Amino acid sequence: MHPSERIKHIKAIASALSSEEWSLLDLTLKQFGLPWTDQWGGTKEAYVIDMIANADDAPLLELAKHLGVASQLETTTEPTFWSSNSARVFLSHLASMKAEVALVKVELAKVGISAFVAHDDIEPTKEWQSEIESALASMDGMVAILAPGFKESNWCDQEVGVAIGRRLPIVSVRVGLDPYGFIGKYQAVQGAGKEIRILARELHDLFMLNPTIGPKITSELVKLLSESFSFDESKRLIALIDKSPYLTTKHVSSMQESIEKNSQVSFSWGVPEKIHAIAEKIAG
């Protein structure tokens, strides 16, 4: 969820739970896997806010649904097409570009971004429009692939409109069409004739600057490092991780664990040393 949506849900949950008895309040938090404590001297509302402030999006949304305070935009079932808790980027494109955009999705996954491509991610049995709406409601940002005909497409224009209305970051990729209208003010990169791997890296670099998306990308990269399947992959990932301004002690602990448990990390030349250097930098 976007920070403004999290704040809205946290406030609504705190207000709803503050009317409950302490025992039922704590029971509710426990059932949703959220923190609780029997050492608290403040109000119930302040207690709930403190307990759920750092909760992941999924349990927070489930609790909001349970209490009947989830916004209409968030009440749909949690989509299955995103990677769990990763940065979620919607790729708005013409049907004629689906093959190229599918490759962009693959390359974005390698740099920590989960991308939605309608032609690939919607199951044949799912209603097309409802799945697109679900993706638009749950995305963190958008990439608009601007090819001739994009402006005339009602679908693409409306998809971009949702991103603008939700005040999410948008990056335009010029493939024969320049940004226009409201999206003209957003960052744009050249896509025509560019290697898809390089384009994905440029998109990664831009989204990493966003304070909402950047931390999610960082966490996904750390997760990918723990699952690394080769020495070269470990080197590639640690180079990306090292440039993130959002690294935390939790990330460091995970990477140190990767040294212990994954030989493709521990024996990759220079990678353990880089992780130790990051740990020292984070520790101050």
Image: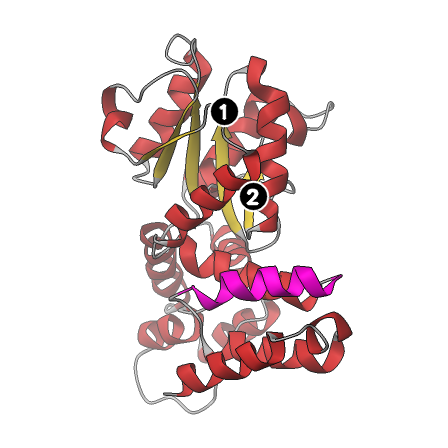
- Quadrant in which residue 47 is drawn: bottom left
Q: Quadrant of the C terminus?
A: bottom left
Q: Is residue 172 above or below residue 97?
A: below
Identify which residue is drawn at 63% across, 39% down. 106
Q: How many marks?
A: 2
Decide: few, some or many residues near mark 1? Use Cα within 10 Å; few <14, some 14-19, many ≥20.
few
Instruction: Give the x, y percent position of residue 228.
Output: 71, 63
Query: Camera-side residue: 5 or 142?
Result: 142
**Residue for point 75% across, 78% down:** 261
Question: Type of residue at label 2?
Answer: Leu
Q: Identify the residue shown where x is 43% and y is 64%.
A: 243
Q: Above or below — where is 231 with respect to 183?
A: below
Residue 180 vertical placement versus 19 (above, below): above
Front position in the image: 206 or 69: 206
68 magenta-colored: no
In terms of secondary structure, what is the magenta stretch mainly?
A: helix
Q: What is the CA distance from the residue labelled 1 to the residue labelled 2?
A: 18 Å
**Is 234 in the magenta?**
yes
Rendered position, 6 above or below 107: below
**Is any atom of residue 177 visible in this view?**
yes
The numbered mark, 1 or 2, whose residue comes first in the sequence reads 2
Which residues lie in the magenta part? 229-244
Kindly identify which residue carries mark 1: 193
Q: Residues within 10 Å of mark 2 (few under 14, many from 20)?
A: many
